């Protein structure tokens, strides 16, 4: 009881100090003079107030919302939802961060306790996981196997595990590589009990979030062994191939680039992906226009969260068609 009263008094102190600084507009020096606290203690108290959630800082972007772009995207591609965020063209990190933040807020409004959330991998998906704040007891599972030679922060099992701990969810790991040498190996993997468990749970996923890209770009995170693989490198030399979604390589019209190669990919099948009620695609930068357009044409995503640069590129190409 004594300890609890002590903690409550400390929290009330933080609250009163924060009110003087943020609401009454007093400087740290003025508050220090009134309370007898030192400047250094004042800084620690204000920092503690933010850490305890007593102070919440909300930033309002000065750029107007892109409602018109969102409505046009929804109409052109029959999307359930489109969100367009302002973002600088460089560096790419800021684009991923802006999209990730917006996607996290959207998913927080969409997810309910007991839902099944499927996740892909990549820079933007990582930012989505980083910006989650709301605690919600959902089931989280990977939609693709692990990718070797990539930083742990980008591994789908690591992303899912971290997100589950952060929001109080339940994580189901997927112990399989994303690409194997032969389709018979993929078949054998799916006969394994732990892998088959995830495959069966894919049918329960009602919300998914995934990225899209092209391993041919400079700075791509796709490991060297993938680019050195004869079959995958041959696919990447075709002009009609525009990139991948969960390692499923797509042509411009949204069809699979190579069915034989796709049988070696250990991730949720595209036909099963299309059955998920909410598939949130996160991608930014105008250079991704072709792969995003292919994913939209194939019907693999029905929610798009992007930056204004990519939104303009998608709409401009539609108007030319």
Image (cartoon, rainbow, N blue to C red):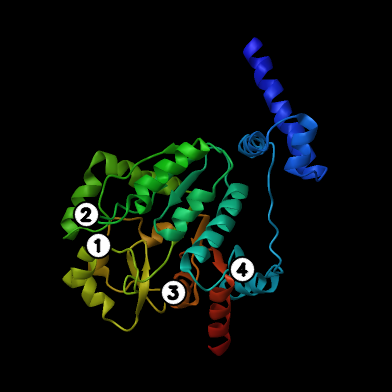
Read off the residue under disc 1: 263
Residue reaching furthest to the bottom: 320
**Spatial distance from mark 1 to mark 3, Cα to Cα?**
20 Å
* Residue 294: percent from left, percent from top: 44, 74
The residue nearer to you, when weighing 70 against 4, is 4
Could you tell me how far apart the alpha carbons at marks 2 and 4 are, in whole angstroms? 41 Å
Q: Which residue is mark 4?
A: 86
- Residue sitting farthest toward the right: 24
Query: Which residue lies under the disc numbered 3?
Result: 294
Labels 3 and 4 touching (C-beta < 8 A): no
Secondary structure of residue under mark 4? loop
Earlier residue among tags 1 and 4? 4
Q: CA distance from mark 2 to mark 3?
A: 26 Å
> What kind of element bears circle 1?
loop
Question: What residue appears at the point 27 percent right and 65 percent down from the top-left corner?
Answer: 262
State the residue in front, 168 or 50. 50
The residue carrying pointer 4 sits among few (fewer than 14), some (14 to 19) or many (20 or more) residues within 10 Å by Cα, namely some
The residue pinned by badge 2 equals 186
Q: Residue at x 71, y 66 (%)?
A: 62
The nearer-to-camera label among 3 and 4 is 4
């Amino acid at each position: 009881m004594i300890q609890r009263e002590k903690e409550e008094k400390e929290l009330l102190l933080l609250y009163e100090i924060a009110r003087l600084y943020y609401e009454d507009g007093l400087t740290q020096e003025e508050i220090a003079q009134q309370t007898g606290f030192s400047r250094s203690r004042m800084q620690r108290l204000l920092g503690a107030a933010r850490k305890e959630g007593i102070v919440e800082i909300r930033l309002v972007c000065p750029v107007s919302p892109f409602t018109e772009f969102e409505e046009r995207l929804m109409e052109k591609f029959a999307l359930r939802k489109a969100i367009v965020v302002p973002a600088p063209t460089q560096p790419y990190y800021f684009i991923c961060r802006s999209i990730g933040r917006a996607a996290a807020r959207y998913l927080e409004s969409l997810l309910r306790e007991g839902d099944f959330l499927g996740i892909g991998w990549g820079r933007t998906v990582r930012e989505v996981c980083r910006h989650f704040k709301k605690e919600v007891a959902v089931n989280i599972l990977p939609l693709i196997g692990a990718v070797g030679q990539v930083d742990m922060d980008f591994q789908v099992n690591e992303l899912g595990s971290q997100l589950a701990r952060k929001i109080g969810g339940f994580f189901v790991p997927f112990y399989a590589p994303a690409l194997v040498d032969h389709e018979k190996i993929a078949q054998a993997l799916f006969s394994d009990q732990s892998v088959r468990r995830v495959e069966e749970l894919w049918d329960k996923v009602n919300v998914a979030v995934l990225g899209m890209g092209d391993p041919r770009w400079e700075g791509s995170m796709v490991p060297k062994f993938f680019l050195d693989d004869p079959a995958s490198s041959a696919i990447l030399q075709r002009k009609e191939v525009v990139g991948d979604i969960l390692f499923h390589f797509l042509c411009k019209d949204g069809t699979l680039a190579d069915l034989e190669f796709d049988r070696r990919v250990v991730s949720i099948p595209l036909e099963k992906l299309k059955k998920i009620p909410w598939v949130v695609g996160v991608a930014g930068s105008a250079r991704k226009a072709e792969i995003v357009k292919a994913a939209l044409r194939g019907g693999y995503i029905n929610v798009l969260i992007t930056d204004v640069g990519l939104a303009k590129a998608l709409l401009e190409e539609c108007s030319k068609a």
